[in-house]
Image: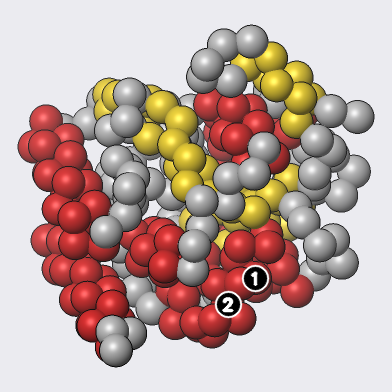
């Protein structure tokens, strides 16, 4: 069976019946996680018989993990407890490995998104269509035709500026480099781990997504972007991202990428 979805150019595209799995890092998201499940329940077409929804609890001090484990609804929810807080980089790495090691399928799609319900799930069918059509990594792009709403104006300016700087520093042709909301082809992530090992995701914090993007692009990954809106007003509680440490981490990533490019020159 295939899913018919609208693509940015208009018309309909058929999404092949690739298994869809989810990795969602969560740190102290007890106020949001059940709302995320409710949102996902409104999109049952995203889940087939072999789908998995893996919530990676990053050492939460609240009831996040307990709420995930107690869920008894229609979604294929699983909880992977990290034990102690290690940051989203470690959570994504653990989640990716769990899905890749636990599947016999040569190709499937891995969706990553925020646990705080700020991702626009209406964008996901188009993202899956682009991945099924051949893109190795599909980015939900707030700076490529989408919008950031319910977000502090200073934060919007800093986000846009960081995107411009990182595109140039990382030599990545993408307008949104750090959003959690993405679709990966499993085969591309396998190539990344085979080449880099755990260094595919060295950064502990939010810059990990710029890092994995740059590393996969260096391996030849094809990238697509789909416009989306990020609605910060849907989040209960404050964002976990700290601006100054994240900016410093972006520059560490850029420095490593420049060093890697330099070492590859004859």
Q: Which of 154 and 1 is in front in this view?
A: 1
Residue drawn 29% across the image and 41% down it: 175
Asked whether, in this view, residue 106 is left or right of residue 162, the answer is right
Q: Give x and y (percent) for residue 173.
A: 32, 48
Q: Give x and y (percent) for residue 92.
A: 52, 65
Q: Residue 160 carries which label?
A: none
Residue drawn 23% across the image and 83% down it: 262
Quadrant where the image shows the C terminus? bottom left
Disc 1 crowd rating (10 Å Cα; few below 14, some 14-19, many 20+) is: some
Residue 37 visible, this angle: no
Residue 172 visible, this angle: yes
Q: Nearer the viewer, residue 1 or 169?
A: 169
The scheme the figure's colours follow is: secondary structure
Task: Return the residue at label 2.
Answer: 193
Q: Which mark is residue 190?
A: 1
Disc 2 crowd rating (10 Å Cα; few below 14, some 14-19, many 20+) is: some
CA separation, marks 1 and 2?
Answer: 5 Å
Asked whether, in this view, residue 75 is left or right of residue 209, the answer is right
């Amino acid at each position: 069976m295939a899913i018919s979805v609208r693509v940015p150019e208009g018309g309909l595209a058929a999404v092949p019946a690739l298994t869809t799995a989810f990795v969602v890092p969560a740190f102290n998201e007890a106020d949001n996680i059940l709302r995320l499940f409710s949102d996902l329940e409104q999109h049952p077409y995203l889940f087939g018989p072999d789908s998995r929804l893996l919530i990676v609890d990053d050492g939460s001090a609240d009831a996040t993990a307990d709420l995930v484990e107690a869920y008894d609804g229609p979604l294929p929810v699983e909880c992977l407890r990290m034990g102690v807080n290690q940051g989203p980089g470690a959570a994504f790495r653990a989640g990716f490995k769990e899905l890749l090691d636990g599947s016999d399928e040569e190709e499937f799609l891995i969706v990553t998104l925020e646990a705080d319900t700020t991702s626009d799930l209406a964008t996901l069918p188009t993202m899956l269509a682009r991945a099924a059509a051949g893109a190795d990594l599909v980015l939900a792009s707030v700076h490529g035709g989408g919008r950031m709403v319910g977000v502090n104006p200073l934060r919007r300016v800093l986000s846009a500026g960081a995107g411009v700087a990182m595109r140039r520093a990382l030599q990545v042709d993408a307008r949104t480099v750090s959003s959690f909301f993405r679709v990966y082809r499993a085969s591309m992530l396998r190539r990344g781990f085979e080449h880099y090992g755990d260094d595919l995701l060295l950064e502990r914090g939010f810059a990990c997504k710029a890092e994995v993007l740059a590393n996969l692009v260096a391996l030849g990954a094809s990238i697509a972007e789909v416009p989306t809106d990020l609605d910060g007003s849907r989040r209960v509680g404050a964002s976990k991202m700290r601006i100054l440490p994240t900016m410093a981490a972006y520059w560490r990533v850029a420095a490593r990428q420049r060093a890697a490019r330099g070492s590859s020159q004859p």
